[in-house]
């Protein structure tokens, strides 16, 4: 690693290294969002860092390498000052009020209270000048003062919102978006149009989505994804319906991702498909202020013919393995039997022979067993009788031989 490597890295690349050093692994969209960078520029920076062996990429997920960590520790790299979030100025910080939101809103409410008071009290004074009775004058004054309080009460009630922690209110003032407010108590203007945005993580199920793999196998994919809104203003101003848009985008990108994998890889590489699908969704949904946290394929349903073929293939594989194991076992058994038979004595062999005769005799059927010893006893007797016969009739034996030879000669 050269010493001039940090000088060649720009501030965004240094920021990417620092972001990756604080977390285990991130996708391109997550890194671009953390560094506040476009997706394409983030890809260029990551490719440069990968060329320098400072980051590693696996299935679209980037993590810092050992060289990158060593570079950070050796050079004492810190977050560049230009990339640190600027501290708000004192004048800018004073513009934010806990209830009214800004000084403009506070001034509006002060003028509204003063003008409404002048209106009601002016009418009351006009009526009191024309009424001679003092009691009636006091009654008119009290009535208009009560009407003034009622007006203020309903005005504040219609403009007051208590925003919970998991929600934000996007305010449009005369068609112009003034930003998101919350959480806590918020007082809007009567001319404001508030829209509530939920920031909690939500899930969406997509059952039985038809897809075609790279080898033209049609499958049904059942998957679920979890998403949340990170930019409330973008989710209102840049997209009409975030939930439906994310669903249509996820189903379309799922078909595109599945089309890059063969059927066997779809079954075996679900994690890679999930990561790739999540990254592609984030590349588009990040412009809407929507972030997809997790994508999980729950079930893949191939056609019945494919399932039957897979079962037959697996059954044939199991049968082949069973045949090989059985043949190997028989070969080992015969080898062991041969080794034992080479060193066995006659007594042991006779004992095994008698055990075999006992096992044969245990059946219910009728059996006739001629032991090998009986044939051994009969063989000498038969041999003696044959020799005696040949010794008693030698002429017949010779005549038979001559006649046979003469017949053969005549036939020739």
Image (cartoon, rainbow, N blue to C red):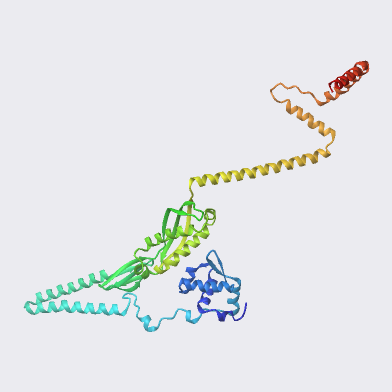
Q: Position of residue 272 (x, y in %)?
A: 52, 60
Q: Position of residue 325 (x, y in %)?
A: 67, 44
Q: Position of residue 9 (x, y in %)?
A: 54, 79
Image: 127 above or below 220: below
Q: Nearer the viewer, residue 332 or 93?
A: 332
Residue 54 in sight in this render: no
Q: Nearer the viewer, residue 390 or 293?
A: 390
Image: 112 above or below 290: below
Image: 93 above or below 386: below
User: Where the N terminus falls, by quadrant?
Assistant: bottom right
Q: Which image quadrant for residue 239?
A: bottom left
User: With 1 as the anchor, is 212 left or right in this view?
Assistant: left
Q: Nearer the viewer, residue 155 or 331?
A: 331
Residue 341 in sight in this render: yes
Residue plotted at (54% across, 45% down)? 309
Residue plotted at (48% across, 79% down)? 83
Q: Position of residue 156 (x, y in %)?
A: 25, 71
Q: Which image quadrant for residue 113?
A: bottom left
User: Where the C terminus falls, by quadrant?
Assistant: top right
User: With 52 as the anchor, is 191 left or right in this view?
Assistant: left
């Amino acid at each position: 690693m050269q010493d001039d490597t940090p000088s060649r890295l720009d501030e965004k690349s240094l920021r990417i290294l620092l972001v990756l050093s604080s977390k285990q692994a991130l996708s391109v969209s997550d890194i671009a969002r953390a560094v506040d960078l476009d997706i394409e520029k983030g890809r260029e920076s990551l490719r440069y860092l990968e060329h320098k062996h400072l980051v590693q990429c696996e299935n679209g997920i980037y993590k810092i390498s050992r060289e990158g960590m060593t570079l950070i520790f050796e050079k004492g790299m810190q977050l560049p000052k230009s990339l640190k979030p600027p501290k708000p100025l004192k004048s800018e910080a004073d513009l934010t009020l806990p209830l009214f939101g800004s000084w403009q809103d506070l001034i509006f409410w002060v003028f509204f209270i003063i003008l409404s008071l002048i209106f009601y009290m002016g009418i009351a004074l006009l009526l009191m000048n024309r009424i001679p009775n003092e009691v009636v004058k006091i009654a008119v004054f009290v009535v208009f003062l009560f009407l003034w309080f009622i007006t203020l009460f309903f005005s504040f009630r219609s403009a007051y919102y208590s925003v919970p922690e998991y929600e934000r209110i996007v305010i449009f003032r005369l068609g112009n978006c003034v930003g998101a407010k919350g959480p806590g108590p918020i007082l809007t203007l009567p001319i404001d149009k508030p829209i509530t945005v939920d920031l909690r993580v939500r899930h969406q199920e997509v059952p039985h989505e038809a897809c075609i793999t790279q080898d033209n196998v049609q499958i049904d994919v059942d998957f679920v994804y979890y998403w949340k809104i990170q930019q409330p203003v973008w989710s209102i101003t840049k997209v009409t319906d975030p939930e439906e848009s994310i669903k249509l985008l996820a189903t379309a990108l799922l078909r595109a991702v599945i089309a890059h994998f063969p059927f066997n890889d779809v079954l075996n590489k679900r994690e890679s498909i999930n990561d790739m699908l999540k990254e592609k969704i984030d590349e588009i949904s990040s412009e809407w202020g929507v972030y997809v946290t997790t994508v999980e394929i729950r079930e893949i349903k191939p056609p019945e013919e494919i399932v039957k073929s897979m079962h037959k293939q697996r059954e044939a594989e199991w049968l082949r393995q069973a045949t090989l194991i059985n043949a190997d076992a028989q070969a080992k058994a015969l080898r062991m039997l041969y080794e034992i038979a080479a060193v066995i004595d006659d007594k042991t062999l006779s004992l095994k022979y008698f055990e075999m005769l006992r096992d044969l005799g245990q059946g219910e059927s009728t059996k006739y067993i001629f032991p090998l010893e009986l044939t051994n006893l009969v063989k000498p007797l038969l041999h003696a009788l044959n020799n005696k016969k040949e010794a008693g009739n030698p002429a017949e034996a010779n005549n038979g031989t001559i006649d046979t030879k003469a017949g053969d000669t005549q036939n020739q």
